[in-house]
Amino acid sequence: MIPVTQRPGNVIEKKGAPMKETATLSYRGRNFELPVHVGTEGETSIDVTKLRSDTGAITLDPGYGNTGSVESAITFIDGEQGILRYRGYPIEQLADRGSFVETAWLLIFGELPTESELRHFEDLLTEHEMIHENLRHHFNGFPSDAHPMAILSAMINAVGCFQKGIVEPDKTESFAKTAARLMSKVRTIAAASYKVSIGRPITYPRPELPYTANLLHMMFSRPNKSYEPDPEIAAALDMIFILHADHEQNCSTSTVRMVASSQANLWASVAAGVCALWGPLHGGANQAVIEMLTHLHDSGESLESFVAKVKDKNAAERLMGFGHRVYKSFDPRAKIIKGACDRVLKKLGIHDPLLDMAMRLEEVALRDSYFIERKLYPNVDFYSGIIMRAIGIPLEMFTVMFAIGRIPGWMANWRETTIDPKARIYRPRQLYVGPTQRDYVELSQRRGRA
């Protein structure tokens, strides 16, 4: 056992200046002083950078659940209090008063854009919304049943091959053009991948439409019938993008930073982030909500019976879209998006048995003491899945929508990693538990395994 004691009152005067707080680690009869770093929100971390060189030991933290891999100024989360802030701004204010494009600028460059900066960024998004015509043929090379996330990742890398300009992450104007290229082209790629998957022709973007409305147009317009995005529907999807724009060092964001630490370019790093997000334990939560409701509907099982199974610890039934690994009280994004969900369903007047069932499930969870005591409240994935189904976005595109929303956060983290003068290539250690040294056995002498 290695006891670690923090020394909050241990301030030693040295030439008139107090020394920084430290923690003491006792190991094999020796004490080691470890620096303590405090973030701007009062979070503390014990610096183990020199632990291996000083002690010969490493920390073991499977899944990095208690390991801080970076100091970041982008997003702050307090899971106990249900707080989410982008660059210091509460998510509630950004979702209520801002736009996705505005939020993207904030995440990438650290400040809310001025009126001229926002207008310029919107113009850049329009300027770069087309993809090279040669790339249109790439879509034909995928099987008709290829998952849109696979297409999205591959096409982001392919588009990167056509971007020959030097990326200058430390220069706002230069990187604004790069960021606009990626944000805008990802939207066009996503819509095209959907059209290809259903055997319909790719729809070109319309320069007069705002960012999110343009996505809806490209997804749902046909050559013989133009889709006119409803402003309220577009606003709901825009809000989903804002709420998903960044979420600290999650799996996909950490992947982007891991790849970026090797000095890989922005396109390759973001494509890697897409692959990480594709995993069902990460970006597939809102899809899992609809799959759960579909199974429940198709099985004919009553909602009461299903909820009873969820509450039975001996049953394997899981309630998708409730509770959150980070938020221990409530998901602040869920409170915001619930209002948008109610407005969308009322606006569209849809009578969908799955959506009806979702609303009934929400009522049960918010009233039942079992869920209340365990803080199993509906999270952002529960409501975003309902909204996207109501809009008409197909299930296999849910994670793609998540990826579009997360692009600004990935770019912000890539940029922060790249311009950090102290950045090092990520290289986690491991605790080896395999065989010790053994000698090579000639093929003729090897015995079969039972």
Image (spheres, rainbow, N blue to C red):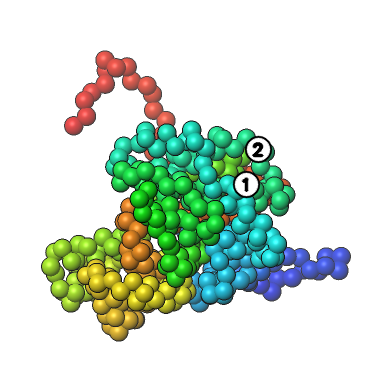
Task: Tell me the CA gap for discs 1 and 2.
Answer: 9 Å
Q: Which residue is mark 1?
A: 178
Amino acid residing under circle 1: Thr
Q: Position of residue 76 (x, y in %)?
A: 57, 67
The answer to whether residue 225 is left or right of residue 174 is left
Residue that appears at 51% across and 41% down: 131
Labels in figure, total: 2
Place residue 220 in its image quadrant.
bottom left
Question: Which residue is more in the foreground, 374 or 406?
Answer: 406
Q: Residue at x 45, y 65 (%)?
A: 234
The x, y position of residue 372, in whole percent, is 34, 81
Secondary structure of the residue carrying tag 2 is loop
- Image coordinates for residue 245, horizontal then vertical, percent: 52, 60
Q: Are marks 1 and 2 in contact (CB under 8 Å)?
A: yes
Q: Secondary structure at mark 1?
A: helix
Q: Nearer the viewer, residue 327 or 29?
A: 327
- For residue 286, say whether it is visible: yes
Residue type at tag 2: Gly
Crowding near the residue tagged with mark 2, few <14, some 14–19, many ≥20 C-alpha atoms within 10 Å: few
Q: Is residue 50 left or right of residue 190?
A: right
Q: Dot 2 corresponds to which residue?
A: 165
Compared to residue 354, the image places residue 329 above or below, namely below
Q: Is residue 152 left or right of residue 419?
A: left
Q: Is residue 228 left or right of residue 365?
A: right
The residue lying at 33 percent from left, 61 percent from top is 392
